[in-house]
């Protein structure tokens, strides 16, 4: 089925029965039944006219008028339960009259009583079911009983045996169509609701897995710095150390606290994004000075590991990005590059225009990423790896990089060869082209 026709069909189907987002399942089933009842009863009315069953035809036209009003009451006025109750009175009342004027038990009315009960129970609340079943049984039992006791009250309108067969066949087809439409609507709605429930269940399972992973990260990575702080104060209190050893311990402690602060920053950012869904505040960012400023934050660490760190960026490049999010992405990627590059290695960050986008690349000559970890590198499923200087990590930084890059309308990917190095790429839209094409 062509997409345009499918969209057209869905659009007008939603206009008739209502969309799943705005109306309940029961309302949509009622509207579906009402629509098909109007069509089918219209056909039945004209067949009754053809068979000279004028009373039955008149009753059919009465059903059309009343059911149209009940459809309006539910679809437009949103009063489903009132429409269902009035439908029960309408159907049982009109069919009771039709029973007397349409050959009683030898006619086709009893089939329609059964179909109407199924329809009404499908769209009503559970508390109405005893009422609907009770009124149906009472009316049908009264009709059959009165005909049995007083057979003369039933009027014979069939002019021939062929007319009787035709009327019964048409009533059977009407009943089967209504049952088919009702069952199909319920089945489709059930499948749709089940799929939604399955999707929500899967999302909850993934969220729970991420929560477990998050708590394991917190438990593992916060224990080490807290133990270091405790060890420092224990040594100071019980042993006592000279100034040189104390300075060295404090230096190491400051590095540990700094890494812990970065960890907590990433954790809080990621948790906020997962719970509330962060919004990117996009603006024009002059990239060259921005990258230079971010690079300076890692110069000291790079020099300490004897790593060459350089930035190459066209001064004219301006991207559309959220400055805070972009800084977190760049900082995490640079931090990983420094962490996994051996002493004497090299890290180069470049920014070049590529059509409507800017490509930022961060290349290192580090240890690379093993093939077994590459598929899950942007998820919490991957395990963290210590750096070349035994630096710890969580694996959360790259998850945050992916989330924040995509929130800015960008894309992130990488190439890596084990023992040779890794290059991460970020693609962001250029401001100049957006202004030109807008």
Image (tube, grey):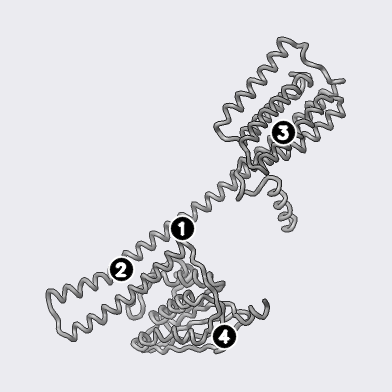
Which one is in front, 85 or 397? 85
Task: State the residue lying farthest toward the top.
Answer: 149
What residue is at 48 percent from the left and 83 percent from the top?
A: 363
Mark before the other along the chain sequence, 3 or 2: 3
Residue 342 vs residue 50: left or right? Answer: left
Pointer 1: what residue? Answer: 206
Q: Quarter holding the C terminus?
A: bottom right
Q: Give left or right: position of 412 versus 255.
A: right
Q: Which residue is mark 2?
A: 222
Q: Nearer the viewer, residue 246 or 134?
A: 134
Along the viewing direction, whichever of 251 and 285 lies nearer the viewer: 285
Q: Earlier in the sequence, mark 4 or mark 1?
A: 1
**In the rendering, at what x and y percent does residue 313 appear?**
53, 88
Coordinates of residue 61 in the picture (x, y in percent): 79, 32
Q: Are marks 4 and 1 in contact (CB under 8 Å)?
A: no
- How far separated are the C-alphas under marks 4 and 1? 39 Å
Which element is circle 3 on? helix
Give the alpha-carbon distance from disc 4 to disc 3, as whole Å: 69 Å
Instruction: Please state the horizontal and vertical placement of residue 125, each as a whole percent of the image.
Output: 57, 35
Q: Which residue is mark 3?
A: 176
Using a 10 Å C-alpha cutoff, classify the residue at mark 4 as few (fewer than 14 neighbours), some (14 to 19) or many (20 or more). some
Which mark sits nearer the N-terminus, 1 or 2? 1
Q: Which residue is mark 4?
A: 317
Residue 252 visible somewhere in the drawing: yes
Figure quadrant of the N terminus? bottom right
């Amino acid at each position: 089925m062509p997409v345009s026709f499918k969209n057209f069909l869905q659009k007008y189907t939603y206009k008739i029965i209502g969309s799943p987002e705005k109306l309940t399942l029961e309302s949509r089933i009622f509207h579906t039944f009402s629509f098909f009842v109007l069509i089918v009863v219209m056909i039945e009315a004209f067949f009754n006219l053809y068979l000279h069953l004028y009373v039955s035809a008149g009753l059919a036209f009465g059903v059309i008028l009343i059911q149209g009003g009940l459809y309006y009451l539910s679809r437009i006025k949103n009063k489903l339960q009132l429409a269902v109750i009035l439908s029960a009175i309408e159907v049982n009342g009109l069919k009771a009259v039709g029973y007397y004027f349409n050959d009683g038990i030898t006619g086709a009315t009893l089939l329609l009583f059964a179909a109407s009960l199924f329809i009404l129970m499908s769209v009503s609340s559970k508390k109405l079911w005893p009422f609907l079943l009770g009124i149906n049984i009472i009316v049908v039992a009264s009709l059959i009983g009165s005909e049995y006791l007083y057979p003369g009250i039933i009027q014979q309108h069939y002019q021939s045996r062929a007319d009787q067969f035709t009327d019964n066949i048409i009533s059977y087809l009407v009943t089967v169509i209504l049952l088919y439409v009702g069952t199909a609507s319920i089945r489709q709605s059930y499948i749709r609701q089940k799929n939604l429930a399955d999707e929500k269940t899967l999302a909850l399972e993934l969220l729970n897995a991420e929560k477990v992973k998050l708590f394991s990260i917190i438990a593992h990575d916060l224990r080490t710095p807290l133990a270091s702080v405790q060890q420092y104060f224990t040594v100071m209190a019980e042993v006592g150390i000279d100034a040189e050893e104390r300075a060295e311990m404090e230096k190491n402690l400051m590095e540990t606290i700094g890494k812990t602060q970065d960890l907590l920053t990433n954790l809080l950012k990621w948790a906020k994004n997962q719970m509330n869904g962060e919004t990117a505040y996009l603006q024009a960012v002059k990239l060259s000075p921005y990258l230079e400023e971010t690079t300076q934050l890692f110069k000291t660490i790079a020099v300490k590991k004897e790593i060459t760190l350089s930035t190459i960026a066209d001064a004219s490049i301006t991207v559309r990005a959220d400055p805070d999010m972009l800084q977190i992405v760049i900082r995490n990627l640079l931090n990983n590059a420094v962490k996994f590059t051996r002493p004497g290695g090299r890290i180069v960050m470049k920014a070049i225009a590529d059509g409507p986008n800017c490509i930022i690349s961060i290349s290192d000559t580090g240890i690379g990423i093993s093939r077994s970890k590459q598929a899950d590198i942007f998820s919490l499923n991957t395990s963290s790896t210590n750096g070349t200087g035994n630096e710890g990590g969580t694996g959360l930084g790259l998850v945050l990089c992916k989330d924040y890059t995509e929130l800015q309308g960008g894309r992130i990917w990488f190439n890596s060869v084990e023992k040779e190095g890794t290059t991460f790429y970020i693609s962001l839209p250029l401001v100049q082209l957006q202004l030109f094409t807008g």
